[in-house]
Amino acid sequence: MIVLKTGRELNIMKEACRISAGALQTAGNAVEPGVTTEEIDRLAEKYILSQGGQPNFKNYQGYPATACISINNEVIHGIPSAKRKLRAGDIVSIDLGAKFDGYHGDNAATFACGDVSPEAKRLMDVTRESLYEGIRAARAGGRVGDIGYAVQSYVEARGYSVVRQFVGHGVGTHLHEAPEVPNFGTPGRGIRLMPGMTIAIEPMVNAGKPDVEVLSDGWTVLTKDRSLSAHFEHTVVITAEGPKIMTVI
């Protein structure tokens, strides 16, 4: 069931999303050679708690950390570790969120660790821009397929592929709500977008083919061909005046 949020609910969600955005910025600022992914995770959790929120990924379906930190050919759901240090040239995807007063925020971005290759930078740039292409397509009266098509067509025109096994989603009193928001689709198809809908749009883009696989830890998702992958995400509210990004500081 899709829940349209009231003005009061959106005000609470704005705070959850503000905390989420601040935590992501804090985590991204810590990305540098020699830092462990566990250290980044702790900084993100400390920030969320300092703002009166709760890490909404931690213990979600058994997930053990505040953030998902995925490196290079890892697409999503990389588990932070004290044994894993970042290296110059890595691209680091961080996905996290916060819960505040019963409502959730969710966002992600891919960060460069030191100087990265031109190929890695281009992948990050294309993935970031595909997110904004998707957001621009998220207009009241349109369809979920409009969002997916906007992302897919932008990405594929530049020689990359979108992951199909994992998708965006509604956000609200639950971290994952209806509707699903794929990064591929057909214009004019799918659930109609209505004012008050709050959704997470999150392109996951591979430099190679779209196929992925899950490691034996049950969480970490890698590109099957081991090509690089990038991930960007915002929580967005559909309004009569157009889509508005909620995960901003």
Image (spheres, rainbow, N blue to C red):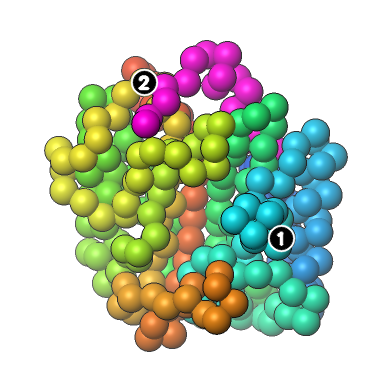
Q: Quadrant of the N terminus?
A: top left
Residue 165, position as x, y percentages in the image: 35, 64
Residue 70, position as x, y percentages in the image: 58, 70
Is 44 a magenta residue?
A: no
The amino acid type found where label 2 is placed reads Pro
At x 49%, y 44%, the residue is 176
- The span shown in magenta is 1-19
* Residue at the spot of label 1: 65
Counting the numbered discs, the total is 2
At x 81%, y 66%, the residue is 39
Q: 245 or 44: nearer the eye?
A: 44
Measured along the vertical axis of the image, is residue 225 above or below residue 28?
below
The amino acid type found where label 1 is placed reads Ala
Measured along the vertical axis of the image, is residue 205 above or below residue 82?
above
Residue 119, position as x, y percentages in the image: 44, 77
* Residue at the spot of label 2: 195
- Main SS of the magenta part reads helix
Answer with left or right where residue 49 lies relative to residue 164: right
Q: Quadrant of residue 14?
A: top right
Secondary structure at badge 2 equals loop
Q: Quadrant of the C terminus?
A: top right
Few, some or many residues within 10 Å of mark 2 (<14, 14–19, 20+): some
Measured along the vertical axis of the image, is residue 49 above or below residue 76?
above
For residue 97, say whether it is visible: yes
Answer with left or right where residue 15 lies relative to residue 223: right
Residue 180, position as x, y percentages in the image: 35, 45
